Image (cartoon, helix red, strand yellow):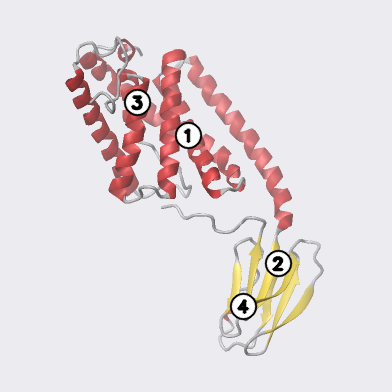
Amino acid sequence: MTKADLKLIGILIIVALCLFGAGRWLFSAVDEGQKAVIKSCGKLVRVIDLTANTPEQQIMVEGRLGISIVEIGNGKIRMHDSPCPDKYCVHQGWASVPGQAIICVPNEVVIYIEAEDAELDAILR
Amino acid sequence: MRSWMPSFGKGRCVFLNRTQKLVYFSFFLTLAAVLGLLESLLPNPLPLPGVKLGLANIVTLLVLYVFGLKAGVSLALLRVIFVSLLTGTFLSVGFWLSLSGGIISALVMGVLLRHCPVFSIVGTSIAGAVMHNLGQLAAASLLIQTSYIFFYLPILLLAGIPTGLITGYIAGLLLPSLGRRFGHKTACRK
């Protein structure tokens, strides 16, 4: 190892740390853009901005079996109550990360969190 | 023959004729492909996609030292194609990532060897590993069309340092014996 090697390693570490800091800063700004999409029987019911400022609320969603109650609070969303027999959707709890989804199959109500371009882009093996 | 055979540059490998060069190049290519294949079979110890040791990089580095830039880049290109055919990932997303990473890293290492003799083989290897990761990331952002992926950049930069160190160290151990066989100046340099 020569001195130039050590310099190269040092520069790389510094650049990486700077980029890491910049990334964290940008990420915190990006987090604001997420939305919760609620669909029932394949049709779009509502799109709600999911930020910490979104007021706590409950939304009634008419599904195939009856009315599901969706609850929003603190930048998160959950299925509060559902007429489905198994209540998997209710037990799943809160969702707040882009890509997360709460799906109630019997009542055909789907909730998913979306960011601007956070769809699944590609699968690498 | 001449059109596809990699040229090894003037004044290098004076003891080898064209056939011998071809044989040695094929030998190195096989070695690189086997190492690449071996690595693709091993599970990734880290939960970071794209971060690998890069064993095939050892061979690229040695060929760059012994045969020169063109041969090194050809080796990287052919190795990626062979490994992708063997693992069944030819023309998949992963293939394009490896291809761009491999070629960019070989190019950078070759240029560094030729024009920046201040770096030892370890430093060259680190630069190559980091450029491999950068090339992969650039290809990924082109294919996927999102800039989100650049948040991954610092991780890949940092990951290139230990992997480059290890592969560079191994190549440095092998180089003296290769230098004796091929009688090349840079190969004997520490």
Chain for disc number 2 = A
The residue singled out by tag 2 in the image is A76
Picture coordinates of residue A54, whole percent (x, y): 80, 65
Find the distance from the CA under tag 4 to the CA under tag 3: 55 Å
* Dots 4, 3 in contact, CB < 8 A: no
The residue singled out by tag 1 in the image is B160
Mark nearer the N terminus (4 vs 2): 4
The residue singled out by tag 4 in the image is A42
Residue occupying image coordinates x 29% and y 25%: B6
Mark 1, other Cα within 10 Å: few <14 / some 14–19 / many ≥20: many
Q: Secondary structure at mark 3?
A: helix
Name the quadrant containing residue B117. top left
Kindly report which numbered mark, 2 or 3, lies closer to the viewer in this rendering.
3
Chain for disc number 4 = A
Horizontal arrangement in the rendering, residue A34 relative to residue B79 (left or right): right
Q: Secondary structure at mark 2?
A: strand
Find the distance from the CA under tag 1 to the CA under tag 4: 46 Å
- What's under tag 1, amino acid-wise? Gly
Q: Is residue B178 above or below residue B165?
A: above
Picture coordinates of residue A98, whole percent (x, y): 63, 60
Kindly report which numbered mark, 1 or 3, lies closer to the viewer in this rendering.
3
Query: Residue B12 versus residue B125: which sits nearer the camera?
Result: B12
Residue occupying image coordinates x 28% and y 38%: B33
Q: Is residue A46 above or below residue A97?
A: below
- What's under tag 3, amino acid-wise? Gly
The residue singled out by tag 3 in the image is B72
Find the distance from the CA under tag 2 to the CA under tag 1: 37 Å
Chain for disc number 3 = B
Q: Looking at the picture, do discs 1 and 4 lie on one chain?
A: no
